[in-house]
Amino acid sequence: MTRWNADWKNATSLYEQAAIAYRLARKHDKAKEAFEKASKGQEMLSSPWDAAKHMESAAALAKEVGNWNEVSDFYRRASELYIQCGRAQPASDALAKGARALEDALPDEAIQLYTDACAVLEDDGKEQMAFDLYRAATSVYVKLEKYTDAATFLLRWALAADKCNATHSQCKAYLSAIIVYLYAHDFQQAEKCYNDCCQVEAFLNSDQNRAATRLLSAYTDGDVEEIKRAAQSSIISSLDHTIIKLARKLPTGDVTAFKRGATEQQEDPLDEDDLT
Amino acid sequence: MSVIDILTRVDAICKKYDKYDVTQKDSNVSGDDAFARLYAAVESDIEAALQKAETAASEKSRASVVAINAEIRRTKARLLEEVPKLQRLAVKKVKGLSTEELTARNDLVLALPDRIQAIPDGSAAAPKSSGGGWGTSAVRTEIKFDSDGRFDNEYFQQTEESSQFRQEYEMRRMKQDQGLDVIAEGLDTLKNMAQDMNEEVDRQVPLMDEIDTKVDKATADLKNTNVRLKDTVNQLRSSRNFCIDIILLCIILGIAAYLYNVLRK
């Protein structure tokens, strides 16, 4: 009587049934627990695929409950199991689902999940699939008003686009980064970013480059009307929705400070006695 | 010799030696008479000009013709300037002159400008129609000017029609520019969409490859299964009772359905 063998197979199927029943009964926390147990069972039965699937269901239920930490934990565990199976796409999908669930509640955690998802895909060499993730992550950053982070992420996006020869997306990412910097009213950064981007030949020959030059020259001239007109141009309207919203709100703050004359006054007057 | 003969001979001799007489006559007559002097000078100039015109008409070389014509024109201009002086002198009374001669002088002076203008100098051909050409290029009549050479101020002023035309042209050009701008924007949008589609399709290429391999595997499996099924069914068909089995099965089902209907009522 005491030496029962651990009969994981039956246990797992029973747990699955229980979980489904609880879900139908809308008892989310019980269903969640049941899914957890089922997943553990599948692990024991060395089928990581089913285990991962159960983990995902558990995580979805945890979202219903509102237990955010558990949500992130479960999704991460699920993604690990998927990677064990050797399937990177579902792994990153799991992380992306987790990030989407946490966007409102724990945005930082969401960003982390998005970054990990992108990393998973890039390791597998499937950068093309990561574009949506990059886009979602940038929109979260912009919502959080972390503009430098957003711009950095956009540049990472451009790097991924470069690896898979998606020049159009790459140039769009560069232009978006410049716009984000301008929105953050950081003209020096924007200019530096622009100079860096011009090193890339693909950007140099593109329409986006022209739009960027126009925008930056409008800034150096301090011409508000020209900035508005440049921001309404059709090239900028083909970017991502969040970026378009930022562009329409340009210019932020006082543009005249960016005029060329202001930057030159910062140079120290040459000292004649200084012999160096 | 008859009188007529004498007269003609005298006339011929006078004409022959007339040229020696000119200077004598001049010095005799024009001593006090400024008018007569000036008039004589003008007359001689006109004669010289007429002679030059005749040589110009017969000249072959165009350059010399042009040069002679230019000279003639200069002379004419100078002579025309002298005419007012002559007119003033004409009304002055000179002693030893009758009133008839005075009026005659006036008439002579009045006739002078016409005579001077009448000297042919290569530009006297007055064009009568729109096809009139320049006199110097008499050889090239096929080159025609529509105007008669009067390029004065009015000629270059814009008429109403031409300024209206210019305005219309500007308006049309502006409209064209606007239309082209709209087209350019549309093309920009199309280009963006096309590039995005390009990237999307590129993204789907490896996915399609995966689907391809998976579907190939599935078809292979299916074929395998079909073959095995066929073998099994063939095995069964070797017994003749197979058809009988099916017929009996249908009969039983029919009876069961009939019973069911009966019992339901």
Image (spheres, coloured by chain):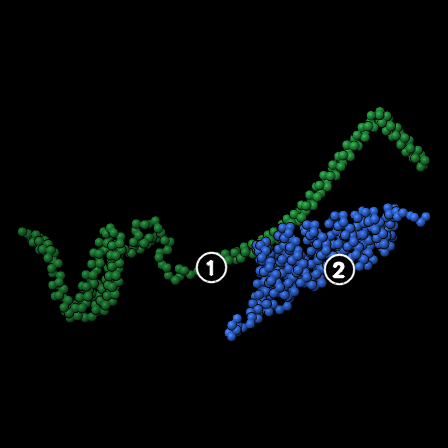
Chain colours: A blue, B green
Q: Which mark is residue A109?
A: 2
Direction from residue A191 to residue B132 in the image, left or right:
left
Q: Position of residue A165 (x, y in %)?
A: 63, 50
Task: Judge by depth and name the residue closer to the eye, B235 or A246.
Answer: B235
Q: Position of residue A12 (x, y in %)?
A: 86, 48
Seen as rendered, the residue at the extreme left is B1
Q: Position of residue B61 (x, y in %)?
A: 25, 51
Q: Residue at x 62, y 64 (%)?
A: A189
Considering the numbered disc 1 on the image, is that residue within a helix, a strand or a loop?
helix
Number of residues whose C-alpha sits closer than 10 Å to that of mark 2, classed few (under 14), some (14–19) or many (20 or more): some
Q: Which mark is residue B163?
A: 1
Q: Residue at x 64, y 68 (%)?
A: A253
How far is mark 1 from mark 2, CA to CA?
A: 72 Å
Direction from residue B125 to residue B15 in the image, left or right:
left
Chain at tag 2: A
Q: Is residue A271 positioned above or below B222 on the image?
A: below
Task: Judge by depth and name the residue closer to the eye, B4 or B151.
Answer: B151
CB within 8 Å, label 1 to label 2: no
Seen as rendered, the residue at the extreme front is A3
Q: Residue at x 82, y 53 (%)?
A: A58
